[in-house]
């Protein structure tokens, strides 16, 4: 897989060199821009996975935010020497993944870049509440969820979409919720079960990513939800206890080597 391609736009030569060196040593391909015009050109050319933009260029205190509006479908990290962003931000909050204070230590930026480039594919059925809860957890923990229904089709059939998103996803979260009823020809009565598309996607991403990069969330009907026999032996996280599933999911994601921010979780759930 090719290294992630990052735009680093900053009119301060020293800062650009410091952050660029750290990101290159971490294995990223860096495209530099020293002016607003150059950054605009690089963003319009595309082919980027992430944009790291200085908040201020020359006398324009909001240049980074204006550039961020050109960053289509990629996360944006804003850099600034200012300890408080609110004055420059105003009410503008859209499209920014993180805000990093410029210091002598480049590690906070490196950690934010690693989080920004982790994409988590969310497999779900018809339970909108469960889907929203998981997406909220991932976004609040500063990860990037991919929900298939929210992506553009671009003329691709469903299997092509799976292939494309499996190639850019590092992790998958599967939601099995009691959306359907079914049984085998020899069994009575009907049992609640997950949607068949969820089972298909589970199998596809299990093969693409491996068991160690997948978490399975189970929302139950008193433990009666039908589990596919081929999934025997996999560990499930029950969603029925509010709060506890977030902590278990966070631990599984961390065990896969992914950095995430869970400082927002209530102390009692950590």
Image: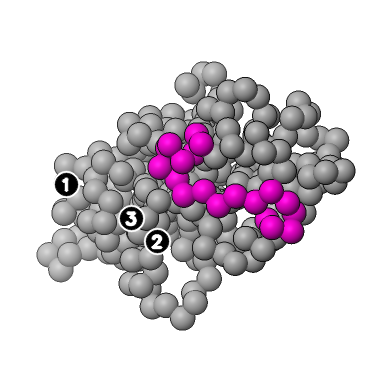
Residue 90 in the image, given as x and y percentages of width and height: 85, 42
The image quarter in which residue 240 lies: top left
153 vs 207: above or below? below
Q: Which mark is residue 24?
A: none
Q: Position of residue 251 (x, y in %)?
A: 38, 30
Tag on residue 1?
3
Residue 260 position in % (x across, y down): 48, 33
Q: In this picture, which residue range is highlighted in magenta?
A: 21-39
The spot of residue 111 in percent (x, y) is: 50, 33
Locate residue 77 relative to residue 218 in the image: left or right.
right
Residue sitting at the far left = 186
Q: Which residue is mark 1?
A: 232
Magenta-drawn stretch contains 42? no
Q: Is disc 1 in contact with disc 2, using a CB cutoff of under 8 Å?
A: no
Q: CA distance from mark 3 to mark 2?
A: 13 Å
Rendered residue at 37%/47% (across/down): 171
Please name which of the two marks, 1 or 2, marks the residue nearer to the observer.
Answer: 2
Q: State the residue position of label 2.
A: 165
Quadrant of the snapshot with the N terminus: bottom left
């Amino acid at each position: 897989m090719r290294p992630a391609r990052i735009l680093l736009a900053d009119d301060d030569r020293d800062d650009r060199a410091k952050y660029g060196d750290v990101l290159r040593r971490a294995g990223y391909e860096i495209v530099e821009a020293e002016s607003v015009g150059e950054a605009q050109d690089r963003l319009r050319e595309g082919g980027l996975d992430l944009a790291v933009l200085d908040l201020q260029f020359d006398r324009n205190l909001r240049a980074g935010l204006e550039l961020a509006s050109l960053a289509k479908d990629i996360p944006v990290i804003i850099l600034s020497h200012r300890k408080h962003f609110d004055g420059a931000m105003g009410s503008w909050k859209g499209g920014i993944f993180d805000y990093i204070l410029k210091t002598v230590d480049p590690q906070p930026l490196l950690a934010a870049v690693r989080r920004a480039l982790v994409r988590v594919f969310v497999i779900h059925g018809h339970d909108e509440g469960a889907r929203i809860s998981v997406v909220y957890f991932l976004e609040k923990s500063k990860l990037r969820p991919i929900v298939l229904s929210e992506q553009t089709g671009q003329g691709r059939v469903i299997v092509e979409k799976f292939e494309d998103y499996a190639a850019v996803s590092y992790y998958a979260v599967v939601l099995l919720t009691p959306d359907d009823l079914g049984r085998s020809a020899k069994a009575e009565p009907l049992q609640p079960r997950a949607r068949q598309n969820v089972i298909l996607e589970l199998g596809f991403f299990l093969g693409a990513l491996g068991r160690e990069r997948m978490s399975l969330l189970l929302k139950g009907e008193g433990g009666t939800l039908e589990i596919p026999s081929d999934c025997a032996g996999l560990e499930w996280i029950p969603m029925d206890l509010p709060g506890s599933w977030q902590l278990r999911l966070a631990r599984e994601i961390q065990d896969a080597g992914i950095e995430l921010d869970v400082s927002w979780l209530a102390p009692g759930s950590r």
